[in-house]
Image (cartoon, rainbow, N blue to C red):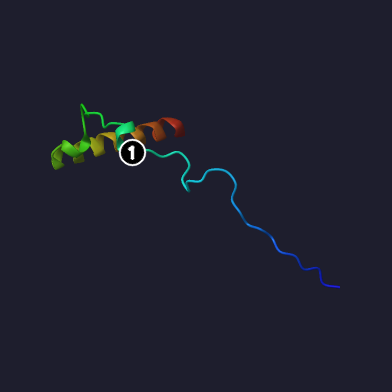
Amino acid sequence: MAHTHTHDHHHHGHARPHGHSHGPAGHPAQTAHWSILRMPVPARLLAALAVSAGLWGVVWLAMR
């Protein structure tokens, strides 16, 4: 004997789909004292190389 029934798929809770939301005035942007995006390209490359060398140094020390 087949059992048939219907389900009511209602989402209970918030009426808004994303929950907590408000306009951008709730979290005003803060001025950045330093930004990698404002650095010239050669300085960015040097910074990336320095970070990479530091991480490889950590790996090298961990392998010892």
Extreme residue toward the top, this view: 33
> Dot 1: few (<14), some (14–19), or many (≥20) neighbours within 10 Å?
few
Q: In which quarter of the image is residue 49?
A: top left
Across and down, in percent, residue 40 comes to 13, 39
- Residue at position x 20%, y 41% from top? 45
Where 28 sits versus 4, above or below?
above
Observer-nearest of 45 and 30: 30
Across and down, in percent, residue 57 comes to 35, 32
Specify the amino acid type for callout 1.
Gly
- Give the side of residue 34 with respect to residue 5, left or right: left
Where 8 sits versus 35, above or below?
below
Q: Quadrant of residue 51?
A: top left
- Residue at position x 82%, y 72% from top? 2
- Give the side of residue 57 with respect to residue 6, left or right: left
- Residue at position x 48%, y 48% from top? 17
Across and down, in percent, residue 47 comes to 22, 35
Specify the quadrant that holds the N terminus.
bottom right
Kindly identify which residue carries mark 1: 23
Across and down, in percent, residue 34 comes to 21, 29
